[in-house]
Amino acid sequence: MTDQPFNRFSDAEIAAVYRAIRERRDMRHFTDAPVAAEQLARLLKAAHDAPSVGFMQPWRFVRVTDRALRLALHDIVETERRATAEALNERADEFMKLKVQGILDCGEVLVAGLMENRERHVFGRRTMPEMDLASVACAIQNLWLAARAEGLGVGWVSLFDVDAVRRLLHMPADAKPVAILCIGHVERFYEEPMLQAEGWAKRVPQALCVDENRWPASIQS
């Protein structure tokens, strides 16, 4: 019997972590059941426990409870959805058949963004200022995995005009919305990523993304 590190989780706890990672899905279909306040509080706490470069904690969240604001966010996304379809040329019709948001259906809507006055944070950002965005992504992933463990779905919507959302939520000029997060109960989780199931794309084999002592070879599309 090998000695295990004293700070190691139990086998069951480890399995639960990997299960949440494996079964997390970008959800688009929700029921109208409300999210309990204590559940939402736990998800936001999980997000706030995320790592951040230089401990700058650049994430900010806006909970959108006003129906008119939800409708406005929905319209902003729909405008960008049509613009994206035009940019996709021959795949436009295929794209327009995809469900890209659940803003009007889910129990909760959060807008995650980058805080204002980020330039004052130099630690870890002098050569890579985009690390503030990486930190916000970590917070979103924390929330996402916690939601999956709680049986709640999350959909990350990124089809929107940044300035339009900034104006709608009265954000400072140097703050930046990053994601519209749809959170809520679902009838079931997708067995595989929705875009893979719909034939839009497929997961790249892990072996093509990892190499040793050199950059992985280019992936041919």
Image (tube, helix red, strand yellow):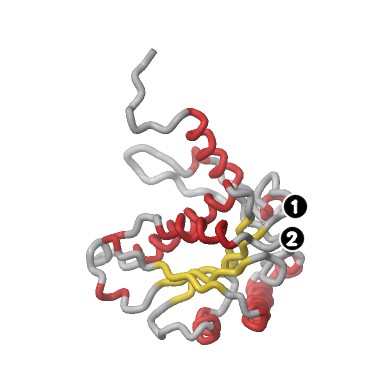
- Badge 2 crowding class, 10 Å Cα cut-off, few under 14, some 14 to 19, many 20 or more, is some
SS under mark 2: loop
Please state if 215 lies on the left or on the right of 78 as rendered: left
- Which corner quadrant of the image does residue 9 belong to? top left
Q: Which residue matches tag 1?
A: 187
- Which corner quadrant of the image does residue 108 belong to? bottom right
Q: Whole-percent x and y of residue 206?
A: 51, 40
Under mark 1, the amino acid is: Glu
User: Image point 62% across, 60% down: which residue?
Assistant: 36
Numbered-mark total: 2
Q: Which mark is residue 31?
A: 2
Q: Whole-percent x and y of residue 162?
A: 51, 79
* Viewport quadrant of the N terminus: top left
Residue 206 visible: yes
SS under mark 1: loop
Under mark 2, the amino acid is: Thr
User: Image point 43% across, 41% down: which residue?
Assistant: 210
Q: Whole-percent x and y of residue 123?
A: 23, 64
- Badge 1 crowding class, 10 Å Cα cut-off, few under 14, some 14 to 19, many 20 or more, is few
Q: Nearer the viewer, residue 130 or 3?
A: 3
Check the image and report above or below for 81 versus 197. below
Q: Nearer the viewer, residue 101 or 148?
A: 148
Check the image and report above or below for 167 versus 36. below
